[in-house]
Image (tube, helix red, strand yellow):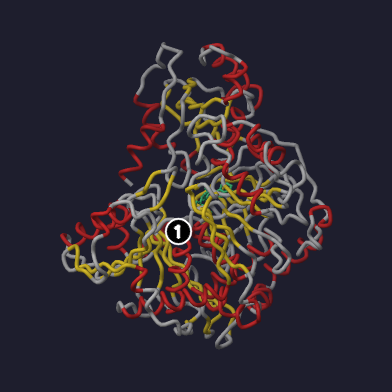
Amino acid sequence: MSAQPIDNLLVENRVFPPVPAGTLGFDRWHIGSIDEYRALHARSVGDPETFWREEAGRLDWFTPFDKVLEWNAPDAKWFVGGRINACYNCVDRHVQAGHGEETAIIWEGEPVGAGGPEIKRLTYRDLQVQTSKCAAALKALGVKKGDVVTIYMPMVPELAVAILACARIGAAHSVIFGGFAPHAITERVVDASSRVIITADGGWRRGDVVPLLKNVEEAVGTLANQGHIVNHVLVVQRTAHDAGRHGWASGTARIGPTKFHWWHDAVYHAGDACPCEPMDSEDMLFLLYTSGSTGKPKGILHTTAGYLAFVQMTARLTFNLQPGAGQVFWCSADIGWVTGHSYVLYGLLMNRVPTLMYEGAPNFPAAPGKPAGVGDRFWDIIARHKVTQFYTAPTAIRTFMKWGDDLPAKHDLSSLRILGTVGEPINPEAWMWYHEHIGRKRCPIVDTYWQTETGGHVGTPLPGAIATKPGSCTLPMLGIDAAIVNEQGQELGPNQGGLFVIRKPWPGMLRGVYGNRERFVSNYWGRVKDPRTGVPYYFSADGARRDADGYFWIQGRIDDVIKVSGHLLGTMEVESALVSHPAVAEAAVVGMPHDIKGNAICAFVTLRASWAAKNPGRKPDDDLRKDLIAHVAKEVGALAKPDQIRFSEGLPKTRSGKIMRRLLRDVACGVEKITQDTTTLEDYSVVAKLRADEE
Ligand code: PRX
């Protein structure tokens, strides 16, 4: 695709200035004014060596580094010569400094018994003991520095322990989201040449058991048939749901030569003196697989010191983290995604702010008086744990909108100070809903733009300094030299759509695609170059524009744009217009071939509960369709008018909550003409479920 300007027809003029720290209960902002931000940003990209040396100085090193950066594009080496350990920086150093009894992790299980949900609190000392034991157990199973340990677990405390234990002994972790099916495990285990898996018998999700152990058994069997032997599987007992699976003793060879061990035997009986291994700055910390638009998943490789330096800084600045100040941070992402790695675990533990981990679904149990599947568990959690910073995804926010305003309204959300969003562009109306109904118009919203590959936030408001605009991730993070350029690498002027690039290396950047140099180079560094020097820029594969204030507006993956009558439209613009209609909860638009326009727009729409309530007995019909089309024409322009509007109960999503536009495109293209039965509500989430099982 060529980088033609994307027409920007959706105009967003609302601006929300930063709020004084005092009014939110912070004693100060780390960065408290736009001037301070601008000065720091200019310094951070003008003299990156000094800037990053200072940031790295916030970490504890076994051996100091002698050089900040060696850059042979696209290969970066950060903090050269230094030795450091991630687990030490998250856990041990806090114990050393006298904070061992402070809460590190607050965990809440999904099931709700008569006495309420199960809650556990782990202090830094608990984490030190448990990571040491787990590390010792892994060593006893033959895991060595440099090995890759696969982790496939529910959101239980042992997941955090397992990750940190790997870091403790210098093994890389490769976490696979617990919602994936066996095929995803086999693919990733082989790619990473991993010989040890940590899992659980099951995990709780919406009142049901996710059969993790069964999936691992299946994967291990398939792998053995392919000639890849997994030597050991370590199993946490969480759900104890299947007696047949529990009648075995630790150390049993259960699938071919693969031995299975209960965590409660292997870990609890292991010694608790296992020191943190000094790692080279550039030693691999973890692999995290991410799906490309084509081909098999890519193992995104992050190394130790750079990732730590970047994530401690971004977590601290974006969320104004202050240790010992009574903050409770909750990121609702699963640790199986990068958001969970960086902002459930590493970023929070390094900054010594308690992090909340919730095991289950937002709609379990159902809210009183509501049908199954409609819940207020998140608001209940925020109220009970007095969460101060809450971080979630647009897809969740749109779901909450759909469930109705009355659910959050019933809860005391006054502890909240900062709200965050991540994962896809947030529609301005969803942003406004979040602002009004969750933030109660008090809390700044940080719309954080980043990727698995970037390690941490690369574009985000800093809440004390940067005014926000709904739908914009605002300005670059310190140390990030972001720009919108054309295919020739030339920076574009205000409001011209182009490619989002980062022109200088940053410590949190990926160091490779595991075992695939070609994909690393071609995917990220092969597209755009510095027009003067020829040095490659990092290209995120997202289209974006900057407005006259320099604010970034991410338009989504460049393959998610539609060319209608010769104009490129970001799917986002049209979707946001639809979602700003009072009847609409969620919308996804895709292109479908059209004789005259080249492509026409097909919109898949789910409706808000409030629409049904206001229109009793009425089915979504042609009148509503006409109304929505007129609304898009008004908000975006006649060009963006959808040719088809299809009402649906749900939209197909990936496991991480991204709308599967590719699938909808197939649906749209496969159907010649819209069904004349205008009263049918289709349920595309069913298609997604089928598809998700293939992942
Ligand atoms: O398209 C952008 C979108 O999510 C992509 C990265 O996905 P992943 O590696 O799974 O990481 C998700 C969590 C960081 C990006 O290329 N994206 C993520 N955050 C935003 C976003 N798009 C717009 N605004 C955001 N805040």
User: For the residue carrying disc 1, how many other residues have a C-alpha within 10 Å: few (<14), some (14-19), or many (20+)?
Assistant: some
In the figure, residue 300 lies in which quadrant? Answer: bottom left
Question: Is residue 70 rendered to the left or right of residue 270?
Answer: right
Q: Nearer the viewer, residue 502 or 659?
A: 659
Q: Nearer the viewer, residue 25 or 582?
A: 25
Question: Is residue 506 rendered to the left or right of residue 415?
Answer: left
| Circle 1: residue type | Gly
In the figure, residue 176 lies in which quadrant? Answer: bottom left
Residue depicted at 64% across the width and 71% down the height: 102
Residue indicated by mark 1: 526
Q: Position of residue 225 (x, y in %)?
A: 15, 60
The total number of labels drawn is 1
Q: Position of residue 396 (x, y in %)?
A: 55, 41
Question: Is residue 244 rendered to the left or right of residue 465?
Answer: left
In this picture, is 298 found above or below 266? above
Disc 1 element: loop
Residue depicted at 70% across the width and 45% down the height: 413
Q: Position of residue 680 (x, y in %)?
A: 43, 16
In this picture, is 471 found above or below 482? above
Q: Nearer the viewer, residue 641 or 457?
A: 457
Q: Position of residue 198 (x, y in %)?
A: 35, 65
In this picture, is 451 found above or below 435? below
> CB of residue at label 1: within 8 Å of ligand 1?
no
